[in-house]
Amino acid sequence: MRKVVQNSSLISPLLSVAPMIDWTDRHCRYFHRQLSPNALVYTEMITTGAVLHGDLDKLLGYSDCEHPIALQLGGSEPEDLAKSAKIGEDYGYDEINLNCGCPSERVQKGSFGACLMREPDLVANCIKSMQDAVSVPVTVKCRIGIDDSEDYPFLETFVEKIAATGCAKFIIHARKAWLKGLSPKENREIPPLRYDIAALLKKNHPDLTIILNGGVNTLEMIDGLMPDFDGFMIGREAYQNPWYLAELEHKLFGTPLPDRYAIVAHMAEYIESRRISAGMPIHSTTRHMLGLFNGLRGAKKWRQTLGGEAHAASSAQSLFDVALAHLIGEEAA
Ligand SMILES: Cc1cc2nc3c(=O)[nH]c(=O)nc-3n(C[C@H](O)[C@H](O)[C@H](O)COP(=O)(O)O)c2cc1C
């Protein structure tokens, strides 16, 4: 285990990349870091059961450049969460986040995720014991409500009870979770987005850091929403159109836009070194890079080549050479 100390007060709330199971693994986060030096990146949700009984290096390992990085935990047992948070802190994570927004049936069976919004006292206990165990910030990601909860009062009661523990940062996915009848995917699309409710929370609690999540996918939206929030967490758009992250980084931090070809060259080095040192298959990283050229001519060729040929490629560089030749050929056509 190793610990890279990061001063949490230096981590900007402005931009973060959402926790996304099966998507935001360490290779994805490494790639996203090339596009945004300042975004706070989140792990996939990792259950306390996995942290307490699993292969820690496999579950929690990451590259130093991924800082600032937050560990998202799934669980509802204060003691297990405290132990897991401490393990995360020892691994050098800069923030520990509790998932109170996932509506999947599997997660509901484990009595955590979005169904925790019904139990603010339990969540407050969980957060308190995590805070007692670690010195990095402990934060919450939640929905605006669940099922037929009242629009605003439900959210405010939930947040106030948890804020009373000293928890100061809440990431609000600004739609309800419907716990019966919708798949997790539908639960990210069907319940309407209510930015007004999340904004009211910030207005009534200016001392809390309120991060807006859900459907933020254009630069123009940021202008309109900026006055009402401390920052934005971006999920699907960052994954499917990674260049959006670079544009947000440029807009929010003034960082010059990077060169996509230089990123590809850097990723080739990363993939090769991990292929040689850890036997990592090429596609486990290239699968996250399919959208890098979206919006440019030739983007489809890039996606097709990476998607179709990664399994058979002898090296990342040779795969990228072919993919870029196709892309450039298409651009020139
Ligand atoms: C594939 C996928 C996996 C997700 N896994 C998680 C997760 O592990 N933890 C979590 O809190 N939210 C998870 N989410 C929800 C996102 O973090 C985010 O709240 C949601 O996608 C809305 O943001 P967006 O509209 O910017 O995508 C997941 C979303 C997707 C698309």
Image (cartoon, helix red, strand yellow):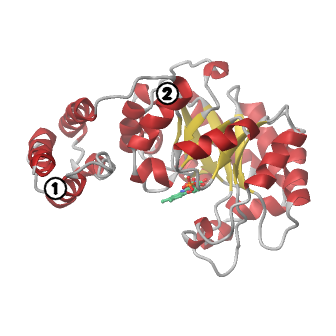
Q: In the shown orientation, is residue 88 left or right of residue 289?
A: right
Query: Which amino acid, by three-letter code, is at mark 1?
Result: Thr
Label 2: how many Cα within 10 Å (few below 14, some 14–19, many 20+): many
* Label 1 sits on residue: 305
Q: Is mark 1 within 8 Å of ligand 1?
A: no
Question: In the rendered structure, which amino acid carries the disc numbered 2?
Answer: His
Q: Quadrant of ligand 1?
A: bottom right
Which residue carries the number 2 mark?
67
Circle 2 — which element?
Answer: loop
Q: Position of residue 326 (x, y in %)?
A: 11, 50
> Counting residues from the N terminus, which is met first, the one under dot 2 or under dot 1?
2
Instruction: Name the residue: 56% across, 18% down.
Output: 5
Residue occupying image coordinates x 9% and y 45%: 325
Farthest bottom residue in view: 181
Q: Nearer the viewer, residue 175 or 63?
A: 175
Circles 2, 1 touching at the beta carbon (< 8 Å): no
Residue 124 visible? The answer is no
Image quarter of residue 245? top left
Tally the marks: 2
Q: CA distance from mark 2 to mark 1?
A: 31 Å
The part of the image, by quadrant, that contains residue 275 is top left
Task: Determine crowd level at label 1: few under 14, some 14-19, many 20+ residues with C-alpha closer than 10 A.
Answer: some
Rendered location of residue 241, percent (x, y): 40, 49
Residue 318, by quadrant, is: top left
Q: Position of residue 1 (x, y in %)?
A: 47, 28
- The image shows residue 79 at horizontal and vertical percentages of 74, 46
Relative side of 161 to 211, left or right: right
| Disc number for residue 146 | none
